[in-house]
Image (cartoon, rainbow, N blue to C red):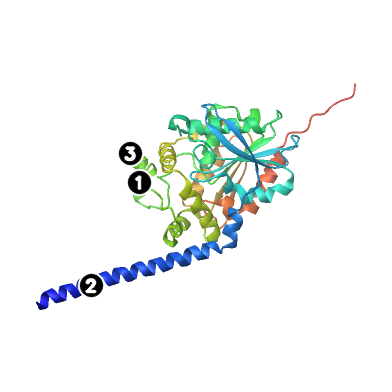
Amino acid sequence: MHDSTTKRLGRRAALATVAAAGVAAAAVERRHLRSLAQDHEYARLSAPLGGRPFRVSSADGTSLHAEAFGADSDLTRPALVFAHGWTEQLSFWGPVIQHLEPSGLRLIAYDLRGHGRSAPGVDGDYALERFGEDVEAIVSAADPGDGRVTVVGHSLGAMAIAAWAEHHQPGEHAQAAALVNTGLGDLLASHLLFGELAKILNHPWAGRAFMGARLPVPPFSSPLQQAVIRYAAFGPDATPGQVAFYERMLMDCPVDVRAACGVALSDMDLWHAVANLTIPTLVVTGDRDRLTPPAHARRIAEELPQPVGLIELRDTGHMSPLERPAELGEALERLTRDTAPAPPIFSGL
């Protein structure tokens, strides 16, 4: 009798402990969500950008959502085209776009296939070559015929630019390019998140299984999830609003799209395509980037036919456009200005 009573009391104590832990966790979650709702930077980043939407059809028929900002009606102005990264949306470029709007440049950002308001890839095709065709479609739409377009990509968006250069003529529509926080192969082998485990994940089957995992992302923000995202993707100066802003994009990315793109990235080898990027190209990285460490950027800069600089942003992780929008915007404005073709000279008859 005594033993059974002890057991019952033990079970009750265990249940009480679990219940108390659940109540404490719920309280932490409520405080977190309340803090997020009151975060002014998160509200600012999440506000509509006010772009002028249009759609472009890629070579395989995939419909891409794009938005124009700045002086898009003045086709004599140079244009910048922005391609975001894996699991992001065009609003990821919002802080850079807002920094550049007073410059008078034409600014165009688009959602990658399957992301944001772009349609899923036709036949579920998320091969890097398709992303390159998407770049060609957007850049062609942005070019009024004089090639005064600078194409800028972050992470997967920059890989798409390399894939574009592999099968197209970059100089036909573009005057310059910028590759931001990216790599062109061996992503898992040089990963700084997993240490020795990266060697195992670098095997093709393991890499595809890991990058293409269809595990769902929890549909609500949490302190633990933000802590993981901050460690993996951001530098030490990132604000809670910046982390939460990207977290929302990650939660919104369809699981099948995230997985299919992950498989494409795990198999990627685009180092040979660097030789085809025959327009002046700027490379930007963060010195704390754990996902595509600076060694990738240095190798790209060394192999480019027309490198115009390598910028390593201090105390910056993988999310340079969110973490350092002013520095990045200024660098892109200089790149566009310095590489603009001379206007045609007309002589009188």
- Disc 3 packing (10 Å; few <14; some 14–19; many ≥20): few
Residue at position x 11%, y 75% from top? Answer: 3
Q: Position of residue 190 (x, y in %)?
A: 43, 47
The front one of 262 and 198 is 262
Q: Secondary structure at mark 1?
A: helix
The front one of 135 and 214 is 214
The residue at the far left in this view is: 1
Any part of residue 46 in sight = yes
Q: Position of residue 74 (x, y in %)?
A: 75, 37
Q: Which mark is residue 205?
A: 3
Any part of residue 277 in sight = no
- Marks 3/2: CA–CA distance: 47 Å
Q: Amino acid at mark 1?
A: Lys
Q: Earlier in the sequence, mark 1 or mark 2?
A: 2
Q: For this view, does 143 lie left or right of residue 254?
A: right
Q: Earlier in the sequence, mark 3 or mark 1?
A: 1
- Disc 1 packing (10 Å; few <14; some 14–19; many ≥20): some
Q: Quadrant of the C terminus?
A: top right
- Disc 2 packing (10 Å; few <14; some 14–19; many ≥20): few
Query: Would you name the residue on which mark 1 appears?
Result: 199
Q: Earlier in the sequence, mark 3 or mark 2?
A: 2
Q: For this view, does 270 lie left or right of residue 110?
A: left
Q: Position of residue 68 (x, y in %)?
A: 66, 40
The residue at the far top in this view is: 349
Q: Amino acid at mark 3?
A: Trp
Q: Which mark is residue 12?
A: 2
Q: Secondary structure at mark 3?
A: helix
Residue at position x 40%, y 38% from top? Answer: 263
